[in-house]
Image: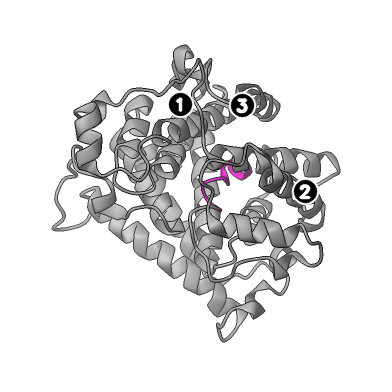
Amino acid sequence: MTTTGAGTGRQAATGSLLGLAIGDAMGFPTEFNTIEQLTARAGTWRGLPFPVSSGTAYVTDDTQMTLALGEGLAAALAAGPLTAERMEAPVRAEFIDWWRSPENNRAPGMTCLTACELLSRGGRWQAASQVGSKGCGANMRVAPIGLVPGLTAEQRSGAAQFQSALTHGHPTALAASDLTAHTVWLLAQGTAPSELLPLLRDHARENRGIYREDWLGDLAEQAQDPDRAGFSARGWDECLAVLDRLESALGRTPGSSAPDLDADPCLATGAGWIAEEAFATALYCFLLLPDDPQDAVRRGAFSSGDSDSIAALAGAFAGAHLGADAWPDAWTEVIEYRGRLLALGAAWDA
């Protein structure tokens, strides 16, 4: 694995968390707009402004839930090595607090709302998990798992899938969350963007038949797969398929065309409403512009699909790669929840 040194030693955690929030803020006012509407407003995607209202760049539930996961994760780690048992209570509590918060007014997804309401009733978390949903609400928030130092590969994979399963129990939501966290981790470790796709494909193939019982318990029994290995493989197969689409969209497969930087990225790898497409389209935007983080989030936000989630993940990838210096002070100083983002970033960069 070639390392660029970009992420390591340059506040990769801070850069990734700020990037996620910046992308989220950039995509907040563009979500649910067509390309024609966005063009009428901003001209071209490169002209998309950073939105500030009354001195604040407001974010959506993507950043709110990222903070909920990150702060719950920090509490779990304070109690000892990360396990499902240590992680469940604080993360569950943070998700419920988010669900009850008056600030939860940013058009959150129904899966998160439904699952958090069920979690608030107590009982086994598996009973709350929505095993039929692979919406992007789980992998939009998973970046903290890839930023925490000192986790083993098994802990990182298990924790990424577990936090997804609390709300989104579909095997593709689990696999996409795992793959998203792994991408953030690779970039934070200094992996060159040009080397990401083979490593991600290897990760998906290696994990395809693994069911993480110590993290998921009997979740698979709520689905209709013949066995636990089949449950896991179903999710990873969809992620491998979207990696094929991503490789083709980037012009890296025989017969494929060079990518069109000015075309709607959702045409290349999907609109992002579902987990594997949010991951792939965000990564597509980042890999188109790996050394231009501001334009990477603009490209994600100026899209016809789930613009805030796509741009948020593109920002998380760019910030993990380039560090905190990737983002201009004029943006980071006005981002909503800045203090909480910086506190988590500083703890994990230390």
Mark 1 surroundings within 10 Å by alpha-carbon count, few (fewer than 14), some (14 through 19), many (20 or more): many
Mark 3 surroundings within 10 Å by alpha-carbon count, few (fewer than 14), some (14 through 19), many (20 or more): some
Q: Is 77 left or right of 112, judged from the image as shown?
A: right
Magenta region: which residues?
A: 138-147
Considering only order in the chain, which callout, 2 or 3, is on the residue closer to the N terminus?
2
Q: Is residue 83 magenta?
A: no
Instruction: Name the residue carrying label 3.
Output: 337
Q: Is 51 left or right of 262, judged from the image as shown?
A: right
Element carrying mark 1? helix
Instruction: Name the residue carrying label 2.
Output: 93
* Residue 322 badge: 1
Q: Is residue 142 magenta?
A: yes
Colour mode of the rendering? one colour
Residue 340 versus residue 115 in the image, above or below: above
**Residue 320 visible here:** no
Image quadrant of residue 340?
top right
Who's the residue at 49% across and 36% down the image? Answer: 316
